[in-house]
Image (cartoon, rainbow, N blue to C red):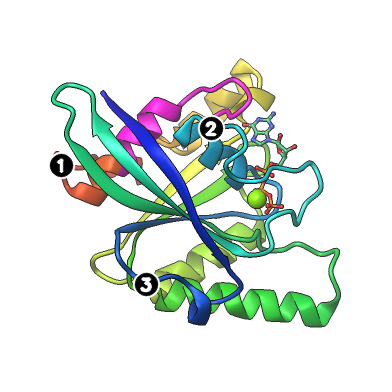
Amino acid sequence: MIDIINTKFVTSAPSIALAPPEELPEVAFLARSNVGKSSLLNSLVNHKGMAKVSATPGKTQLINFFNIEFRDTENDERYSARFVDLPGFGYAKVSKSIKAQWQKNLTQFIAEREQIKLFVHLIDARHPDLDIDAEVDAYLAEIIEEDQVLLHVFTKMDKLNQKELGVLRNKYPGALMVSNTKKRGIDKLTQVIYEILFDIEAKDDSLR
Ligand SMILES: Nc1nc2c(ncn2[C@@H]2O[C@H](COP(=O)(O)OP(=O)(O)OP(=O)(O)O)[C@@H](O)[C@H]2O)c(=O)[nH]1
Ligand SMILES: [Mg+2]
């Protein structure tokens, strides 16, 4: 089994220009505001207060960097990586000019940060077909490089009943789903991220 240990906050930056040196393979978590990016980071590293969580959208306003280590529990081998918690997109309650600046910083970071090896695009399981998520996917398709991977993960699966979960699974076969409140799907996602970053095993294309 793969777990994550030795989590360490590195820094917060408003833009790529002020981001830390590109030392480690990075995983960028992106989603609409309030979908659960910060919560998922905390679930993955099993540390409640690492990334700040809030019921009010727009909590994460800077790009936050965390160094982590994957550990293979069978042989104790360690692999270093960095998780990047991005501000949510589509957050409406700030002034237009601030929003435009955020959006610019965010899109520039996503497009230009070469150390990002994996984009994890989180989508609220209750709202899988929003235009804004489709727009983000279209943007990612435009800028993604050959050595980068895009993974979709549905969050808040605890909010769906069995029937709704079945409908979602039928529509998106093999999709990864998590619940941060119920800690569901976290070990599986940890394993998948590790395999993608370090190219450990044959990758399962149905997951993407
Ligand atoms: N039921 C349920 N609630 C969740 C889950 N994940 C996050 N939440 C809640 O959703 C709200 C937003 O979570 P955050 O992790 O702060 O979301 P975020 O995407 O980081 O939001 P911003 O930083 O504003 O962009 C909080 O009230 C969380 O407790 C989940 O899997 N299930
Ligand atoms: Mg956040």
Q: Which mark is residue 200?
A: 1
**Can you tell which of label 1 and label 2 is closer to the viewer?**
2
Residue at 24% across / 65% down in the picture? 147
Figure check: 81 above or below 104: above
**Can you tell which of label 3 and label 1 is closer to the viewer?**
3
Figure check: 126 above or below 132: above
Residue that mark 2 sits on: 47
Q: Amino acid at mark 3?
A: Pro
Q: Is residue 139 visible?
A: yes
Q: Which mark is residue 21?
A: 3
Cβ–Cβ under 8 Å for marks 1 and 2: no
Q: Which mark is residue 12?
A: none
Q: Does residue 183 show up magenta in the picture? A: yes
Q: Is residue 177 visible?
A: no
Q: Amino acid at mark 2?
A: His
Image coordinates of residue 33 in percent, x first then y, are: 70, 54
Image position of 192 (left or right of 55): left
Residue at 63% across / 65% down in the picture? 62
Separation of disc 3 and disc 1 at Cα? 25 Å
User: Dot 2 lies on which element?
Assistant: loop
Mark 1 near ligand 1 (CB under 8 Å)? Answer: no
Q: Amino acid at mark 1?
A: Ile
Image coordinates of residue 88 in percent, x first then y, are: 65, 58
State which tag comes first along the sequence, 1 or 2: 2
Q: Does residue 190 show up magenta in the picture? A: yes
Separation of disc 2 and disc 3 at Cα? 25 Å
Image coordinates of residue 39 in percent, x first then y, are: 61, 39
Residue at 37% across / 72% down in the picture? 21
Question: 154 or 200: nearer the eye?
Answer: 200
